[in-house]
Image (spheres, rainbow, N blue to C red):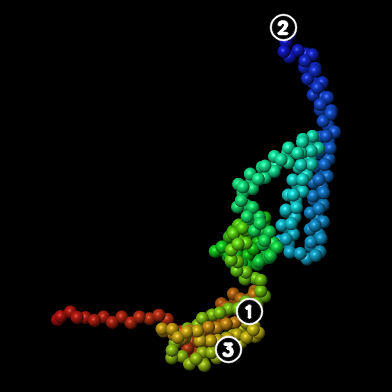
């Protein structure tokens, strides 16, 4: 009986393997060359686009987004090209990729919504990197706008990732878009206070604060005659960067000014009368 793995059979298999390997080497080398050239082209493309958009002073958020999208598109095309160089039938591969794309798209509807939301944010620019915004119940400074989410840093240095889909479809309050900020401060004084004297004290504090702008002009109006006080609305304008400090300083200075002028700031009080009906 002839052995299954006779020496002549082994030689045949080795010869076939070497022959196939020699025939396959050109395709392998070609695929490696295409891969290396493709990677270099992608890097060169990113560099050219970055320099071009930088010279045009375009939004850095748009720059990063465009580079990320085109980089992944070119990587997919490079992958298909390399596979084709290796002798794989790309027709069946593209059909498989298309079917897989449909399945993945159905499974990742939320992610596609976030991707579309990212495009809307980039195109319509409701906010930019560095803006302080409030949305979806969160507030913070925009750190980066990514493909699927937006990264913000809160005032206490916490990182929050907000899905772009919900963010683009919701209400966004942007505190950084306009160069000037308006503050409305409500003050309460007692009914016995002289309103003319009160307004003089308020305008005196405003005029001494260089952070408060002269134009638009500040104003003081009676807001309401409340149960225990007269409520006044003080409006003043500041530059965006000075808003928080100006409001804080106003509260501190107005308290000292009211005390010096003898103006009372009412606070809730309750008188309790105890009646003793016990028989002696």
On the image, the x and y values in percent for residue 185 come to 54, 80
Would you name the residue on which mark 1 appears?
238
Residue 256 seen in this snapshot: no
Distance, label 3 to label 2, CA atoms, is: 117 Å
In contact (CB < 8 Å): disc 2 and disc 1: no
- Secondary element under disc 3, as helix, strand or loop, is helix
At x 67%, y 45%, the residue is 101
> Can you tell which mark lies on residue 150?
none
Residue 273 sits in quarter: bottom left
Q: Residue furthest left?
A: 280
Q: In this rendering, would 34 be left or right of 137? A: right
In this picture, residue 111 sits left or right of residue 189: right
- Mark 2 vs mark 1: in front: 2
Q: Quadrant of the C terminus?
A: bottom left
Which is nearer the eye, 266 or 177?
Answer: 177
Residue where numbered disc 3 is placed: 204
For disc 2, the marked residue is 1
């Amino acid at each position: 009986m002839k052995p299954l793995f006779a020496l002549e059979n082994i030689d045949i298999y080795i010869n076939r393997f070497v022959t196939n390997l020699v025939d396959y080497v050109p395709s392998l080398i070609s695929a490696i060359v295409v891969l290396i050239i493709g990677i270099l082209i992608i890097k060169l493309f990113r560099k050219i686009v970055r320099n071009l958009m930088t010279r045009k002073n375009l939004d850095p958020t748009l720059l990063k987004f465009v580079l990320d999208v085109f980089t992944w598109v070119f990587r997919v095309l490079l992958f298909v090209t390399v596979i084709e160089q290796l002798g794989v039938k790309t027709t069946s591969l593209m059909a498989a990729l298309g079917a897989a794309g449909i399945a993945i798209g159905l499974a990742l509807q939320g992610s596609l919504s976030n991707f579309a939301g990212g495009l809307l944010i980039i195109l319509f620019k409701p906010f930019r990197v560095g803006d302080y915004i409030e949305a979806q119940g969160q507030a913070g400074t925009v750190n980066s706008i990514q493909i699927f989410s937006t990264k913000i840093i809160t005032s206490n240095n916490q990182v929050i990732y907000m899905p772009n889909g919900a963010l683009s479809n919701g209400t966004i309050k942007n505190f950084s878009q306009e160069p000037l900020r308006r503050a409305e401060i409500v003050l309460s004084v007692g009914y016995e206070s002289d309103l003319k004297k009160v307004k003089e004290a308020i305008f005196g504090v405003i005029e001494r604060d260089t952070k408060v702008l002269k134009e638009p002009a500040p104003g003081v109006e009676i807001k309401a005659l409340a149960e225990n006080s007269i409520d006044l609305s003080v409006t003043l304008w500041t530059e965006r960067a000075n808003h928080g400090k100006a409001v804080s300083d106003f509260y501190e200075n107005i308290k000292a000014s009211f005390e010096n002028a003898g103006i009372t700031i009412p606070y809730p009080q309750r008188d309790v009368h105890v009646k003793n009906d016990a028989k002696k």
